[in-house]
Image (tube, helix red, strand yellow):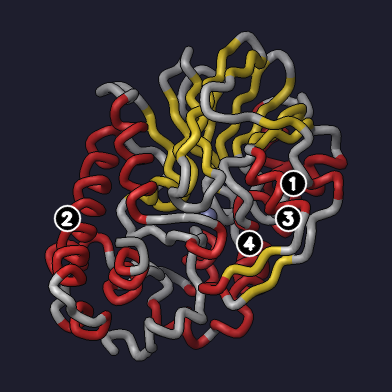
Amino acid sequence: MVHGFDPSRRNFCLCCLGATAFAASGGWLSPREVFAKSKTIVDMIRQSAAETPITVHPLRGGLFVLEGSGGNIGVFAGRDGKLLVDAGISASKPRIEKALLAMDETPVSRLVNTHWHFDHADGNEWLGKAGATISGTLKTQDHLESAQRVEDWNFDFPPSPASAVPAEIVEDGSTLAFGGKTLHFVGHPAAHTDGDISITFEDDDVVHAGDVYWNGIYPFIDYSTGGGIDGMIRGSEAILASAGDRTIIIPGHGQPVSNRRELQAYRDMLVSIRDAVAGLKAKGQSFDEIVAAKPTAPFDAKWGQYVIGPDFITRLVYEGV
Ligand SMILES: [Zn+2]
């Protein structure tokens, strides 16, 4: 057990620790540290968000990224008020409000969820109560309005209050006119969950990829609610296909201002690991034998330094091939 845990038990987190956890731990949280805290991983992420500053990254055309509250939050500040892509953790509310007010004094009138996970949708409730219309896929709506269990976090989520559930459904191919701009939605079936959607701000050539893309770190894949490695690869390829040299790509997690070149490296990493694990599995090797063969070794130094370590990404890929 490379990191002192048993990856076959899958009873500790890990999606979705963002910069919040870095700050709480004084740096990057190792898998061992996460395991030590595993009994309250969801609570720990919430607590961490309560203490973490929000960093604002200006992009272009009135677009920004907020870092420090779970997943990366996209913001468009325009003439019709603000539109947010993902809502972060509710404990960050005072710091998110302050960051938004520093842009201008308009309210948040729209919120789009990339998927249902709490580190992207926990803030739905306060934003919905403040008057934002919330949009999400049908699957995201389903997951938020009913109880959910995520095995890898060993956590049961209750149904969300009505004010936190998307009232407007967007799907692959949907468009939305907002503040003089056009947003285009692309669905990614069976990727990080069963309800992921990425959002393109066509006028500014900016894409929020959601958790289909983790920049510079191994991703979490939520098989409990319909995710899978092949869908992650297809999703990455779909975003790559529509991106150019100038496109700004916002990942769900990891360094929040990214580009086509970095997404290509991420996609290539996923394909290499998928092929290596699938090849060993096809030869009849057991999960333990495949872990021992270290199929992720060429990538671990760069990608394995965050909460999803080599054994865990191997497990997440093994489950889907
Ligand atoms: Zn997620």
Q: Is residue 303 left or right of residue 276?
A: right
**To which residue does mark 2 refer?**
272
Amino acid type, residue under disc 1 in the picture: Asn
Q: How many angstroms separate mark 2 from mark 1 (CA)?
A: 36 Å
Q: CA distance from mark 3 to mark 1?
A: 8 Å
Q: Are marks 3 and 4 in contact (CB under 8 Å)?
A: no
- Residue 301 visible in the displayed image: no
* Mark 2 closeness class: few <14, some 14–19, many ≥20 residues within 10 Å: some
**Which one is earlier in the sequence, the residue at label 2 or at label 1?**
1
What is the x, y in percent for residue 49? 63, 62
Mark 3 vs 1: CB contact within 8 A: no
Query: Pointer 4: what residue?
Result: 49
Q: Report the amino acid beneath label 4.
A: Ala
Label whose residue precedes the other's in the sequence (3 or 1): 3
Q: Where does label 1 land, which residue?
A: 124
Q: Is residue 97 above or below residue 90?
A: above
Residue type (three-letter) at the residue carrying disc 2:
Ser
According to the picture, the residue beneath numbered tag 3 turns out to be: 90
Under circle 3, the secondary element is helix
Q: Nearer the viewer, residue 105 or 315?
A: 315
Q: Position of residue 296 (x, y in %)?
A: 19, 67
Which quadrant holds residue 37? bottom right
Mark 3 or mark 2: which comes first in sequence? 3
The residue mark sitting in front, 4 or 2, is: 2
Lower sequence index among marks 4 and 1: 4
